[in-house]
Amino acid sequence: MTAFSQNQTQSGWRPQRRDAPVRLYLTGVQGDTAQLVGVRAAGLALELNLVPFTDWIDPDELSGAAAAVIQVDAATPASIKRFQKLARSTDRPLIAAAYDPPLALVRSLLRTGACDVLPLPLDLAELESSLQQIQQDSAASATGGPVSADRSKIVTVIKATGGVGATSLMAQLSARFAASEARHGREVCLLDLDVQFGDAAFQLGLHPSLSVADLLAAGSRLDGALVRATSVGHDSGLQLIASPRELMPIEGHSPDEFIHIVDTAAREFGTTFVELPTNWTNWSLSVAARSDLILVIAELTIPSINRARRQLDLLRSEGLGDLEFRIVINRFDKAQARTIRNSDVLEALGHEIAQTIANDPATMRAATDRGVTIDEVRRKSAVGKDIGSLDAIIAAALGLER
């Protein structure tokens, strides 16, 4: 698994002399790793240092390096602590490397400060791609390009099950959020990764000529400029990247490809809402692991709450239970609360209901049919008020002023 961190400190990469090396701190040379000795990656020489997992690495050793690759081991807590301490002690870009790193470890390392997490044995192509990404981020930061790391936020949307109205809700919510953020000079993107049945563009009356399929086809050519060119703007200020026009195999691409798209969108626009397919895949789990916040959309019915519980159980089983979650009940009718209480939801899901969204099918249908926001259909409505409250909840969770 390769995962670029949207939280990396871009200022950590500074212009280096041409002979500045990339220092590899590994416990041994196995497999293809031996072939990296004495070669170059992204124009930088690789310098191998063999050290045990737990031996301390002096930050001063990294002062003349372009970057460093540090081996960690999931079964050796001391190696993880070493990496964490080193990340706090140096401004050099750090890449973690591990054998078969579990998803929970990858996420922990990225949050700690790793620019990337690579599998061992190291592959030259993967290492070069990682170093090139760091260099691109540094160049963009120096020229005032994409937004800063603290403004790159990923909000992932999980549907308890199909048919809960999540897409309509997210189209309206992201448009409202974009309008709120525009008042502070910030952008918002809605990335529709429901690659088989996504129709967020239709919900907002947009007709993009490009889609996620074009970003996947771009491969290594994918960058912020291409992501922006693929997006289409809404009157609210929202930038939307549409799902493919044609059905595509849900497992037809690797997690790395989707993570690259999500991270690039977040760096380019700032807050990025990501709608996932209902069925889980390796790549959708990886995207969920990148999230600053996860919205679980359900209805206040026993079947829907049960499906939401199974979704959360899966994430917990994959070591993602410590993610920030907000439970959103869509199409809420007060009569439902007589049979299923908030305490019942808390017991079933381990989270209280963060927000309910009023059931107003006529207003929502009119907005969808016209491809406009709810406020353009009905200035003051219960559903519009609830979406405004959810907007504030998400902003508070992400640390964004309103």
Image (cartoon, rainbow, N blue to C red):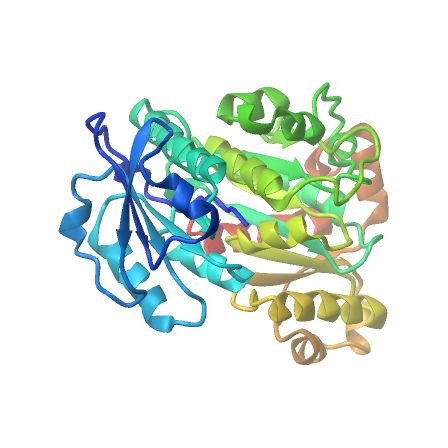
Q: Where, by quadrant of the figure, is residue 108 drawn?
A: bottom left
In the foreground, 297 or 259: 259
Name which residue lies at 78% across and 36% down.
199
- The answer to whether 164 is drawn above or below residue 353 in the figure is above
In the foreground, 236 or 272: 272
Q: How many marks?
A: 0
In the foreground, 252 or 48: 48
Q: Is residue 324 visible?
A: no
- The answer to whether 112 is drawn above or below residue 266 in the figure is below
Q: Residue furthest left?
A: 60
Q: How far from the left and from the top, in percent, is residue 223?
A: 51, 26
Q: Is residue 79 visible?
A: yes
In the foreground, 218 or 208: 218
Question: In the drawing, does residue 35 fall left or right of residue 230?
Answer: left
Name which residue lies at 78% across and 76% down.
340
Name which residue lies at 56% across and 39% down.
262
Question: In the drawing, does residue 62 fall left or right of residue 354?
Answer: left
Question: In the drawing, does residue 250 fall left or right of residue 192?
Answer: right
Q: How far from the left and from the top, in percent, is residue 162?
A: 83, 53
Q: How far from the left and from the top, in percent, is residue 237?
A: 57, 28
Q: How far from the left and from the top, in percent, is residue 225?
A: 51, 21
Image quarter of the C terminus: top left
Q: Where, by quadrant of the figure, is residue 336 drawn?
A: bottom right
